[in-house]
């Protein structure tokens, strides 16, 4: 029974995708604040925040694709079952 408990603790694809989207959006918000605060200061900090914001955008896009793929797979399973 312990292996069944371990399997049930694995997050679903929907949960993982939503967590990725939340993490990415939080990162973009953090980077936007860093750019706004550092606009008159250190150029290196602003550049790093801009690069990180691009990475966060890719995380959000990948998570959205994962969510779409999971939705399509679930829809296909429901179609097969019906």
Image: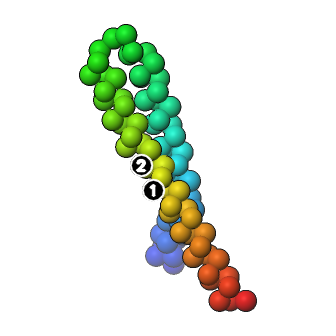
Return the x and y of residue 77 as percentages of the image width and height.
62, 83
**Whether residue 27 is situated above or below residue 14 in the rendered picture:** above
Instruction: Say what secondary structure mark 1 lies in.
Output: helix
Disc 2 packing (10 Å; few <14; some 14–19; many ≥20): some
Return the x and y of residue 47 as percentages of the image width and height.
31, 27
Instruction: Say what secondary structure mark 2 lies in.
Output: helix
**Whether residue 20 is situated above or below residue 66 in the rendered picture:** above
Left or right of 11: which side holds 34? left
Identify the residue at image location x=60%, y=69%. Answer: 71
Query: Which quadrant is home to the C terminus?
Result: bottom right
Return the x and y of residue 9 as percentages of the image width and height.
52, 64
Return the x and y of residue 26 as percentages of the image width and height.
50, 37
- For the residues labelled 2 and 1, the Cα–Cα distance comes to 6 Å
Residue 12 at least partly seen:
no
Check whether the beta carbons of the residues at disc 2 and disc 1 lie within 8 A of each other: yes
| Disc ID at residue 62 | 1
Left or right of 78: which side holds 51? left
Disc 1 packing (10 Å; few <14; some 14–19; many ≥20): some
Identify the residue at image location x=39%, y=15%. Answer: 39
Identify the residue at image location x=39%, y=40%. Answer: 54
Judging by the rendered image, the residue that carries numbered circle 2 is 58
């Amino acid at each position: 029974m312990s292996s069944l408990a371990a399997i049930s603790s694995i997050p679903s694809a929907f949960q993982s995708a939503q967590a990725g989207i939340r993490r990415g959006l939080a990162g973009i918000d953090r980077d936007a604040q860093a750019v706004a605060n550092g606009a008159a200061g250190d150029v290196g900090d602003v550049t790093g925040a801009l690069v990180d914001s691009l990475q966060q955008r890719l995380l959000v896009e990948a998570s959205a694709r994962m969510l779409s793929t999971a939705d399509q797979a679930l829809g296909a399973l429901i179609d097969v079952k019906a």
